Amino acid sequence: MKLLMTGGLGFLGSHSIEKYQSEGFDITIIDNLSSNVIQPDDELCKNCDVIIDDILDIPWTSLDGQYDIILHLASPVGPVGVLKHSGEMARYILDDIYWAIEGAKKYDCPLIFISTSEIYGYRDTAEFLKEEDDKLLVGNYAVRNEYSIGKLLAEIVLSNTAKVSDLKYQIIRPFNISGPRQLRDGGFVLPTFVNQALKDEPITVFNTGEQVRAFTYVKDIVDGIYLTSVANNHMNEIWNIGNGDNVSTINYMAEKVKEFTNSNSEISHVDPKTIHGPLFEEAWDKIPNAEKIKSLLGWTPTLGVDEIIESVINFWRK
């Protein structure tokens, strides 16, 4: 089996390499090194074919052989990582999905698209969200909304293309991924807190810190992605992947990071716009209902929130 993976040197990609190699796949990676966490010569990539380029600069006619699955991970990511793409985010997402669709048609193989739980948008209070729930995007024209709308439109493009062609796809909506190798550059909360705590710097909690998240271990997310990619009897579906048992506040995260690192850091509540500028917007509260992937594909998350925090601490201590 041969897998083509876009964005394979990124956080989610690096763990996907490990998973698909363990399942016996030959892997081709395309990555433009815009948000990579590993290098092309990393030990993880030693048996992979790595192409360093933007996917839009690679015509499908230049790729030899046959692919059995296309895993499309490439995308700007993170509450801070998306800010520099203001005004261009939607174009990136849509141009890339049309490119990936062309490949899936060429090879008659499933296209696995990594969307985002951000598309669910605003809720008055945190609630468990099912795949079919309404998408309530409200507020100003923030970069974060541009990202969410772009991902949602890519989902719609996939679905509507499949209605008039033989396209096979899966749409994945991951919730609050974290774990080893995630960098703080994109504005991700756990690696930020851990790096601050290990240096005895103030742990910067945005606003009240009562924002609700359900962090999910990266390898659990990847296991779910893999299950959907080989679920030939359940193609052309949308899947939430997230650990609803890990519901916690950001304040809880900060306190546990300080406790587990035995840090002298103070926990400081700050306005994120003073750090990241006026374009920054905090994510709305959301909790995954992942019963669909559990019941149909047998997916089960493995790590609780404290264990995820410890895995991030152990990574950065090394």
Image: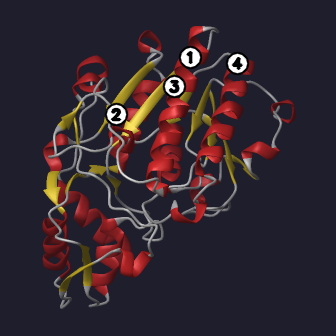
Question: Do the numbered discs 1 and 4 sit on residues whose CB atoms are within 8 Å?
Answer: no
Residue 22 visible in rendering: no
Q: Could you tell me the amino acid type at mark 4? A: Lys
Q: Secondary structure at mark 2?
A: loop
Q: Are marks 3 and 1 in contact (CB under 8 Å)?
A: yes
The label nearer to you, 1 versus 4, is 1
Q: Earlier in the sequence, mark 2 or mark 4?
A: 4
Query: Quick one: label 1 or label 4, which is nearer the N terminus?
Result: 4
The residue identified by callout 4 is 105
Q: Which residue is label 2 attached to?
A: 135
Disc 4 residue crowd, few under 14, some 14–19, many 20+, Cα 10 Å: some
Type of amino acid at the residue the image marks with label 1 = Asn
Q: Is disc 2 in contact with disc 4, using a CB cutoff of under 8 Å? A: no
Upstream in sequence: badge 3 or badge 2: 2
In which quarter of the view is residue 90 placed? top right
**Disc 3 and disc 4: Cα gap in Å?**
17 Å
In which quadrant of the rendered image does the N terminus lie? top right
User: Given this view, does label 3 or label 4 mark the residue nearer the observer?
Assistant: 3
Q: Earlier in the sequence, mark 3 or mark 4?
A: 4
Q: CA distance from mark 1 to mark 2?
A: 18 Å
Q: How busy is the neighbourhood of tag 2: few (under 14 within 10 Å), some, or many (20 plus)?
A: some
Q: Which residue is mark 1?
A: 160
